[in-house]
Amino acid sequence: MPANNEQTRTDQNSSIKLVECPRDAMQGLTDFIETDVKAAYINQLLRVGFDTIDFGSFVSPKAIPQMRDTAEVLAKLDLSETKSKLLAIVANPRGAEEACRFPEIHYLGYPFSISETFQQRNTNATIAESLERTQAIQELCVAHSKELVLYISMGFGNPYGDPWNVEIVQRWVDELVPFGIHIFSLSDTIGCSNPQNISYLFGNLIPAYPAIEFGAHLHTQAHNWREKIDAAWRNGCRRF
C-alpha cells in the first residue's frame, strides 16, 4: 500500500466514533412511545458524549409507525450543550428532502441492502433502483450540506439464500464510492455476524479503501458482543 494511503488510514483510525442508535431499538416496538418520552430519552443520550445519535427516520408512517413523530421529537431536543451529531434514516429521495429541511440534522442514513430480497422488503425497491436512489439522496446531501451514511444492510449474510461474500460487498462499494460517499456502515441486520466474517470483511475492505470510513453496525447479545467488537477493532474499524 502506498505510504500516503497508509497515512490516511492511520489518521482516520486514530480515534473511536461511538454511534448510539435509539431509533433502531424503538422502531421494533409495537406500542407507540409518546413523543415526550422519546425526546426525554434522546436528550439524556445527548449529554453522554456519543459522536452521533441515530435518533429517528423520515419514512412512511405505514412502514414504521413508531417513527411518525420524528420531526416533533427533533423540535424537543436540546442541542445547546452537546457535541453529538444527529442522524436520521431515509428510504427514498422524498424522505431525504424532508430530512434536509432541518439544519439540526448532520447525517442522513440510507439502508442499501446487498440482499435483493431484503432490499425489496425493506425499501420496496430492487438493488438497481436502490443504486439510483442512493445517487439522488447523495446529491440532496451535497446540496444541503449533509453527509450520507450508507448502511450496507445484510452485510454479513442473509436468511433468504441470496448470495453473500466479501466480493459481493466490495462490488457494491465499488459502485457506490464514485458517488462521493465517505462513510459506509456494515450492518449485521439479523445478528448473524461472528468474529470470522467480521474479520474477513473489515480485513479486506479497509485496506482497499483507505479514504473511506467503515463502521460496524452490529446486532448482538450479552454473551457475544465483545468478541464481535474485538474482531472489528483488530481489523481496523473505529466506528461502532
Image (spheres, rainbow, N blue to C red):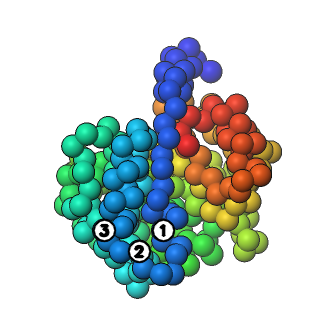
Residue at left 63%, top 31%? 236
Mark in the foreground, 2 or 1: 2
Q: Quadrant of residue 203?
A: top right
Q: In the image, what residue type sits under mark 3?
A: Asp
Q: In the image shown, does 97 or 134 lie closer to the viewer? A: 97
Residue 85, relative to residue 15: is it above or below?
below
Tell me the residue that label 1 is attached to. Answer: 26
Side (left or right) of 85 relative to 154: left
Q: Position of residue 235 (x, y in %)?
A: 68, 33
Is residue 185 shown above or below 17? below
Foreground pick, 64 / 45: 45
Observer-nearest of 199 and 126: 199
Q: Secondary structure at mark 3?
A: helix
> x%, y% of residue 139?
29, 54
Q: For residue 96, which quarter of the picture?
A: bottom left
- Tell me which residue sits at (56%, 78%) in the image: 121
Q: Residue at x 48, y 46 (%)?
A: 19
Question: In the rendering, at what x and y percent does residue 79 appear?
Answer: 25, 47
Amino acid carrying label 2: it is Ile
CB contact under 8 Å: marks 2 and 3 = no
Viewer-nearest of discs 1 and 3: 3
Answer few, some or many: residues within 10 Å of disc 2's Cα (few below 14, many 20 plus, some between 14 and 19).
Answer: some
Asked if one can make out residue 100 in the rendered structure from this viewpoint, the answer is no
Which tag, 1 or 3, sits closer to the chain's start? 1
Cβ atoms under marks 2 and 1 closer than 8 Å: yes
| Mark carried by residue 36 | 3
Secondary element under disc 2, as helix, strand or loop, is loop
* First-in-chain label (2 vs 1): 1
At 56% from the left edge and 56% from the top edge, which residue is drawn?
A: 152
Disc 2 target residue: 33
Front residue of 117 and 37: 37
Q: Is residue 162 visible?
A: yes
